[in-house]
């Protein structure tokens, strides 16, 4: 970063600070973001929480949403689902799409409120209509599973495609699974592989497992046990149970890696073959 850019960022911080201290809500919000992200100043969640609260209490919708996320994750304050829900509702009522998505997640998970698929669907719909890719992907999941609505693969596909076009990893994974299983569209291993690649590159463990499985089984690509091993390893390190099992099996049988000592496998029981995953398992 050039000396001029550093000077400009320092000036931005100073003027935001002056305006924030005089009660300007937008300045308070921007100052909170700087402390929250460690931009133009050292990261300090406690200070970020104070300034975000000042902006939120003045009715700034995106500040209310950020304050809700801080309560949700316990950043700069004690974790509190009730407070998170309050601020998400305040921002969502003003039409803030990110807050609408977050409110949908609260109802989906039953965090701070009774679990309710219908209300989750309603809030995801409002957010998705405003173009939020994460909400579009969740709307697709609801239609694929029939959560809070009748199952509708055609609608699920439509929303997954909208979200995937914006780079949403969950939507890309689900499109890959639909292509793999031939649900709502012809089975196509090559298309499935392409979507798994996109989602795996973003670090989604389930997509990394699916990509590893494609290499291991030669689905849509020439079998490559070493690449299968590499993708299973990434997914396993992030806690994916299917990848952890597959990785253990590769170690035992020497696929993509040197085999372990003879006879080790006999000390374990092979679990039954798993059913082919579908979008409803995500």
Image: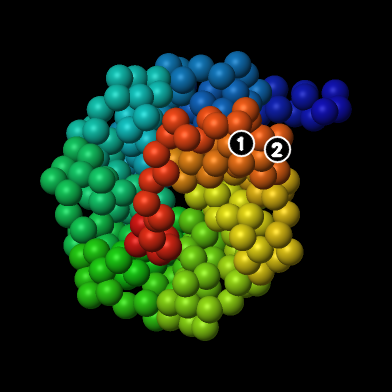
In this view, the residue in front, 161 or 76, is 161
Question: Residue 123 is drawn in which quadrant?
Answer: bottom left
In this view, the residue in front, 153 or 115, is 153
In this view, the residue in front, 276 or 133, is 276
Describe the colour scheme in one phrase. rainbow
Question: Residue 24 is drawn in which quadrant?
Answer: top left
6 vs 189: above or below: above
18 vs 256: above or below: above
User: Which residue lies most toward the bottom here?
Assistant: 186
Quadrant of the frame with the N terminus: top right
Quick check: 143 left or right of 199? left
Q: Residue at x 66, y 63 (%)?
A: 218
Q: Is residue 147 visible?
A: yes
Query: Which of marks 2 and 1 precedes in the sequence?
Result: 1
- 10 Å crowding of disc 2: few (<14), some (14-19), many (20+): some
Q: Residue at x 46, y 20 (%)?
A: 45
Q: Secondary structure at mark 2?
A: loop
| Proximity of marks 1 and 2: CB atoms separated by less than 8 Å | yes
- 10 Å crowding of disc 1: few (<14), some (14-19), many (20+): some
What residue is disc 2 on?
A: 257
What residue is disc 1 on?
A: 251
Quick check: 20 left or right of 213? left
Question: Residue 155 is drawn in which quadrant?
Answer: bottom left
Q: Is residue 162 visible?
A: no
Q: State the mark number for residue 138.
A: none
Q: Position of residue 130 (x, y in %)?
A: 43, 65
Q: Position of residue 168 (x, y in %)?
A: 54, 57
Q: Position of residue 42 (x, y in %)?
A: 60, 16
Disc 1 to disc 2, C-alpha distance: 6 Å
Q: Position of residue 49 (x, y in %)?
A: 40, 24
């Amino acid at each position: 970063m050039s000396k001029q850019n550093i000077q400009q960022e320092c000036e931005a911080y100073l003027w935001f600070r002056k305006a924030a201290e005089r009660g300007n809500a937008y300045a308070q919000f921007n100052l909170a973001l700087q402390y929250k992200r460690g931009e133009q100043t050292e990261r300090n969640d406690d200070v970020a929480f104070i300034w975000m609260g000042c902006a939120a209490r003045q009715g700034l919708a995106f500040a209310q949403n950020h304050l809700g996320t801080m309560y949700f994750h316990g950043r700069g304050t004690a974790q509190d689902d009730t407070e998170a829900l309050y601020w998400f509702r305040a921002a969502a009522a003003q039409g803030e799409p990110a807050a609408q998505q977050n409110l949908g997640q609260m109802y989906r998970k039953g965090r701070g409120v009774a679990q309710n698929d219908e209300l989750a669907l309603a809030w995801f719909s409002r957010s998705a209509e405003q173009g939020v890719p994460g909400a579009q992907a969740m709307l697709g999941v609801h239609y694929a599973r029939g959560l809070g609505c009748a199952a509708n693969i055609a609608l699920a596909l439509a929303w997954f495609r909208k979200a995937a076009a914006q780079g949403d990893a969950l939507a890309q994974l689900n499109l890959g699974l639909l292509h793999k299983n031939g649900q709502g569209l012809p089975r196509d291993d090559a298309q499935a592989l392409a979507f798994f690649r996109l989602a795996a590159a973003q670090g989604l463990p389930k997509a990394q497992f699916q990509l590893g499985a494609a290499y291991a089984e030669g689905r849509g690509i020439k079998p490559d046990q070493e690449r299968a091993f590499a993708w299973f390893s990434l997914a396993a390190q992030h806690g994916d149970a299917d990848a952890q099992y597959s990785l253990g099996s590769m170690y035992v049988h020497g696929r993509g890696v040197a085999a372990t000592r003879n006879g080790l496998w006999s000390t374990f029981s092979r679990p039954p073959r798993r059913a082919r995953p579908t979008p409803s398992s995500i």
